[in-house]
Amino acid sequence: MIKAWLHAARLRTLPLSLSGIIVGTGLAAVLGAFDGAIFGLALLTTTGFQVLSNFANDLGDSQKGTDNAERVGPARAIQSGQLSAGQMKVGMWVVGLISLLSALALIYTSVPHLSTNAIYFYIVLALACIAAAITYTVGKNAYGYRGLGDIMVLVFFGLVSVIGVFMLYGEAFEWIVLFPAISIGLWSTAVLNLNNLRDIHNDAKMQKRTMVVKLGFQKAKYYHVFLISFGMATWFFTVYLLAISAMNYWLFLTLIPSIGFALHLQKVVQNTEPAALDPELKKVALLTFFSSILFAILLNFAPH
């Protein structure tokens, strides 16, 4: 049973979801605002939101018939019979409650740094994160079935994750934080786009109107090139500004993953078989995670 729940949790998706927290924390830490309790609770809360989203996605796609024999990629927990829909609903309630409690503990820990209005804002934001995690594929108006998943990933994985955690440390908004937030958001959206490119035929058949289904396979590949390339551009801009202003030229090492991104784009552009894109999801997710780790470490610990 434990193995079934771990399978449903899709642990391979966690590094990508934590990338924004790492980048936002790295930016706050270099200003002397690091707090281990806030960092730990932010990681726990984000993990909870991601697992909740994965549980809900498993339930929603199974209810709508999208998880069927024709679907490409790893079999889902309900689809494979490892868990029932009823068990998944209970799991969602449990993880949702844990995530909410973790989010409230995170906000409480950050209270000394926040105004009253900011506290209320973060409580609403936590509830919005839970709602977004569930309604991606669950419900009659699931936004994942209307092509809105991309913008939601950009907002929550990028802007909310990076900027939100940065300001939890008590830091006022800085424009420089916006650019890496955009990069993480775009690369996270690229992972979703790869997933939808892989599943284009089955999604179209099941009336799941993802951005890929709306654009068509070829145009969706061009869209993917934009997501990765613009993310690389804003990342380079961030690294350049920080390296020059702090005279920390070690930061340019965070551009190394760009080589991996370039090789990835070559494979996507040349691809003609959607199913063959499945291995690329892991590559982009790990490149994003590696970039965030490298960024936070070199920003704070590189000699300069």
Image: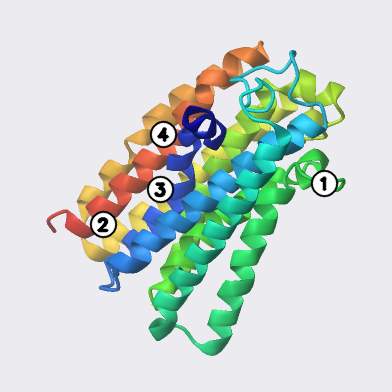
Instruction: Say which residue label 4 marks.
Output: 286
Residue 139 is tagged as 1
Q: Earlier in the sequence, mark 1 or mark 2?
A: 1
Give me the C-alpha separation between circle 1 and circle 2. 43 Å
Disc 2 crowd, CA 10 A, few/some/many (<14, 14-19, 20+): many
Where residue 176 sits in the image (x, y, percent)?
A: 43, 65
Q: Would residue 215 be visible to someone looking at this image?
A: no
Looking at the figure, which quarter contains the C terminus?
A: bottom left
Q: Earlier in the sequence, mark 4 or mark 1?
A: 1
Where residue 256 sits in the image (x, y, percent)?
A: 32, 35
The disc labelled 3 sits on which kind of residue? Answer: Phe
For marks 4 and 1, give the one nearer the viewer: 1
The disc labelled 1 sits on which kind of residue? Answer: Gly
For marks 3 and 2, give the one nearer the viewer: 2
Apparent side of residue 90 relative to residue 101 in the rendered image (left or right): right
The disc labelled 2 sits on which kind of residue? Answer: Leu
Instruction: Say which residue label 3 marks.
Output: 236
Q: Earlier in the sequence, mark 3 or mark 2?
A: 3
Give me the C-alpha separation between circle 3 and circle 1. 40 Å
Instruction: Say which residue label 2 marks.
Output: 299
Say if mark 1 contacts mark 2, CB within 8 Å: no
Tag 1 secondary structure: loop
Q: Earlier in the sequence, mark 3 or mark 1?
A: 1
